[in-house]
Amino acid sequence: MATLAPGPGRCLLALVVLLLVDVPDAPAGPVEWFKGKGKDRQPIFKETQSLPRVTRVAVSSPTDYSIRISDIRPEDAGTYYCVKFSRGPYNELTEFVSGPDTVVSVRAAGPASVSGLWLLPGPMFWLGAALEKVLMAVLLFLLFFFLLRR
């Protein structure tokens, strides 16, 4: 029997969430992703249709059904899971196996403002700046010294 083993959801720059799953040795049939459980579950990805911000990561892979949710919003927070369906002899779909939950948390923050962004230099910056001044002074002294010796 195949098992769905999703990897952890990964957040990249708070703009994209990857929900990872690999389905090896499974019967023919699609994999679908849902948000929520039971009667409240909402399909977010099917092979034939998905939400506009949800795309499959490895489109041509027969086993990798990882999805990418882009432009993350607070309403995207929730529990996600995938379901592998098997296709019967009359092309009917039955739920074959369901993967464990992946919880996605979204913490809203205001848009970044360049005018409000202050980058304070750390100690390595000051050390580098001081070292640069010392080296410049030594070079000027040596240049002056050698020019006077001529």
Image (cartoon, rainbow, N blue to C red):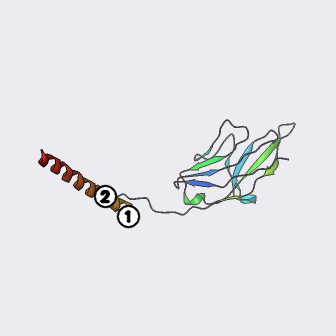
Report x, y in % for residue 126.
33, 62
User: Is residue 71 left or right of 88 when viewed as pictured?
Assistant: left
> Can you name the residue that lies furthest to the front here?
149
Kind of residue indicated by mark 2: Leu
Of 86 and 118, the residue lying toward us: 118
The residue that appears at 63% across and 43% down in the rendered structure is 57
Report x, y in % for residue 113.
38, 59
Numbered disc 2: secondary structure:
helix
Q: Quadrant of residue 132?
A: bottom left
Of 66 and 93, the residue lying toward us: 66
Numbered disc 1: secondary structure:
helix
Residue designated by label 2: 131
Q: Quadrant of residue 31?
A: top right
The residue that appears at 81% across and 48% down in the rendered structure is 95
Mark nearer the viewer, 1 or 2: 2
Residue designated by label 1: 123
Quadrant into which the C terminus falls: top left
Q: Residues within 10 Å of mark 1 (few under 14, many from 20)?
A: few
Q: Earlier in the sequence, mark 1 or mark 2?
A: 1
Q: Is residue 64 visible from the viewing direction of this image?
A: yes
Q: Quadrant of residue 27?
A: top right
Q: Residue 115: give its label.
A: none
